[in-house]
Amino acid sequence: MTTLPDGAGPVVDKQVRLEGILRSLGRVAVAYSGGVDSTYLLAAAVDALGSHNVLALTVASELMPGREVALAEEMAACLGVDHQVLAFQALEVPGIAANPPDRCYLCKREMLQRIAVAASAQGFPHLVHGANRDDLDDFRPGARAAAELGVRAPLEEAGLTKAEIRDLSHCRDLPTWDRPSQACLASRVPYHTPLTVEALRRIQAAEGYLHDRLGVRALRVRDHFPVARIELPPGDWPALLAEDARPALLAEFRRLGYRYVALDLAGLQSGSLNDLLVGSTT
């Protein structure tokens, strides 16, 4: 159970509301990515219902970095939850590979349908996902898919924001509390640029290099092939621009096929490619 510091009354109220929502469901399957939100939702479900009444289901596809699946498996094991990984060939679903602005809707709908079938077959009638209150203010076509399929968002229903979920996760000693926000690899490719396995592997390798060699945590490599546009918080720029780091970085990115490597002076911007959709109703 999460213990909050004094003066956290509003958050406590939301936490109590969340527990009530989960208890009313009885048995739940969590669409589990291993990120901040879905991990706290999974932990809250365990607290409210007991691990035997909770199932974690993760979809593994070419759009999700392999390290994300491994982290999800590790975290579910720490919480004592039965965790299953479902294979999903996203680029074979009609429409997704073309990368339209509603790609996330098409992908999320297919993924949630498959998760719901797996959950129901194992006696879990309710499926929940980790959308939070802040997601209502962003371009989230995937939320429409969840609503259409009747997938509940208890964190959002309880009114919990991302910052509050991080605080609650910290108080519960969840190692994901300060984890940078993640997004699928397709979000690195401009809309209407077709998605290919080669491009997704290139992006994953480029970001993996920055994670592992430079120790950078929060980042995006936007793929404007043959240009790689790196988004980093300004505080991490010195690691990228150091004289002893740049030659190796350039060599690695060129090995991956990029001809030009750029650092975006706007820093890290979650969903930056959505800026091109201003005025879109898609």
Image (tube, rainbow, N blue to C red):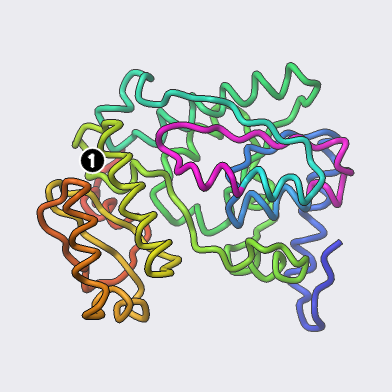
Q: Quadrant of residue 215?
A: bottom left
Q: Which quarter shows the N terminus?
A: bottom right
- Kindly identify the residue that appears in the image at 67 percent across and 71 percent down: 167
Instruction: Return the residue nearer the eye: 92 or 236.
Output: 236
Residue 273 located left or right of residue 119 = left
Q: Position of residue 206 (x, y in %)?
A: 31, 53
The reply to whether the magenta stretch includes residue 111 is no
Q: Is residue 234 above or below residue 128?
A: below
Under circle 1, the secondary element is loop
Position of 41 with respect to 4 (left or right) is left
Which of the pair 122/202 is nearer the observer?
202
Q: Amino acid at mark 1?
A: Tyr
Q: Say which quadrant the C terminus sits in.
A: top left
Looking at the picture, how far across and down is residue 40, in whole percent?
69, 55
For disc 1, the marked residue is 191
The residue stretch that appears in magenta: 45-71
